[in-house]
Image (spheres, grey):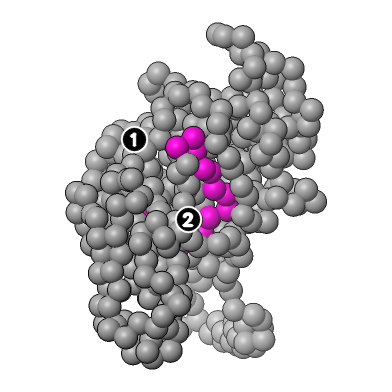
Amino acid sequence: MSDISRTAAPARGAPAFGARVLGAGLALALVAFAALVATAPALATVRTASHAVGLIPSRGSRTPPDGQMPVTGIVSGVPADPFGRFAFADVPLSDVTPENLRRFDTVVLMQVWPFELSAAQEATISRFVTNGGKLIIFDSDETTRNDYSWLPYPARIADGCVNCGMTSGFSRILADNGLISFNQANPSYVNLQELGERTDAIGDANLLVTLDPHWNVSAVVTNAHGETGAVVASAGNDGLIIYNGYDTDYVRPSSSSAWLCLQGSPPAFECPAPASGVDWLAKMWYQALAQPWGSAAAAPSAPSTLGVGQTVDPAQVTAPSSLRCVARRRLSFSFGKLHKRIRQADAYVNGRHTLRVKARNLTRLTLRKLPKKGGYTIKLILTTQRRYHLIMRHHYRAC
């Protein structure tokens, strides 16, 4: 039954004066409403923050992974960031259906291996995003090599290091947005130095690798092998995907839990509070939940993922010298000096994707039909066996 109330028609033969008055009043109201709409700005979709959050898989539905994110209390050290503003509910893997996900505006894949999801469930989560939902992915360090090619904006995870406890490596924040910031005056500021000193969040991070230009990267990690990738990234339009690959072993499940850190003695690893008093892992979790989204919301401003990877000097791929002009409209590159197995090469000429080559061990690449005149920039993105990107940029001019 429709929930629109209806006015009963007058009985046959009864005067219709009341109906005429109601009709005239309704007409005037509609005219006034039309005038208001004509002068009002167009409505647009904006979701100011997550409200109903579905956690996949259900907390406690199997042996709980390390780093269960807090859902009660506050972000330790930041009383202004309460988790009570969000309504959390468990969604076991078996309950990932279109009907169940309609209850939420946000769903979280927390340490989920995609192979645990059926093709139908992957399609359900993908449609949830395209229909305007927010998807948050925290997948380190219980998983590695996750394939997210089924998402609206495909991506995957490079070779991680499950339970390695690595403390080497380096992380850098590229953005000043609501997910993470290098600006201490921004409420979303994260102190990576303190995070790296106390936890394995950087050393054991999982890194997002993609060539989809919709992804923007807010922070990167260079691991102990010298491989670089995105650790905080986002992509979306009306819906939004947020990826965070910092390892969460040492997050506080609640603000009343003991502080844990690398310096603590096993098995408890308990430590005094850090100098800041802030749980930076919990803070990034809160900020992902608090991030606005929608077609009219400002997306997290950050560089494109196409520029993220280990920079390669042109000499390492035996790139021809740029001192001479290119007369034959053809250039060749060799990868032997890299001492890495290359599985895929993508070439961009003046920002346009012109070539993709795949092989078990790619050793050489030739570009043809280059511009006939003027200057142009070539960018090569080489994907290694460990699924990371090596990036070379070089400028040439045609003869």
Q: Nearer the viewer, residue 55 or 337?
A: 337
Amino acid type for the residue under numbered disc 2: Thr
Name the residue at the left extreme.
360
Which residues are the magenta region? 210-225
Q: Is residue 190 left or right of residue 200?
A: right
Question: Marks 1 and 2, how far apart in space?
Answer: 30 Å
- Residue 365 in view (yes/no): yes
Q: Which residue corresponds to the image point at 27% horizontal and 84% vertical from the top-left?
A: 328
Quarter of the figure with the C terminus: bottom left
Q: Which residue corresponds to the image point at 79% horizontal and 28% vertical from the top-left?
A: 275
Residue 263 at what x, y percent from top left?
Answer: 64, 17
Residue 355 at what x, y percent from top left?
Answer: 27, 70
Amino acid type for the residue under numbered disc 1: Trp
Quarter of the figure with the N terminus: bottom left
Q: Nearer the viewer, residue 120 or 371?
A: 371
Q: Is residue 277 left or right of residue 312?
A: right
Badge 2 density bin: few <14, some 14–19, many ≥20, Cα 10 Å: some
Q: Nearer the viewer, residue 173 or 42?
A: 173
Whether label 1 touches label 2, CB < 8 Å: no
Q: Which residue corresponds to the image point at 34% horizontal and 51% vertical from the top-left?
A: 337
Give the number of the mark in front: 1 or 2.
Answer: 2
Circle 2 sits on which residue?
311
Q: Is residue 190 magenta?
A: no
Which SS class for mark 1? Answer: loop
Q: Nearer the viewer, residue 57 or 330?
A: 330
Circle 1 sits on which residue?
113
Residue 19 at what x, y percent from top left?
Answer: 55, 82
- Residue 289 in view (yes/no): no
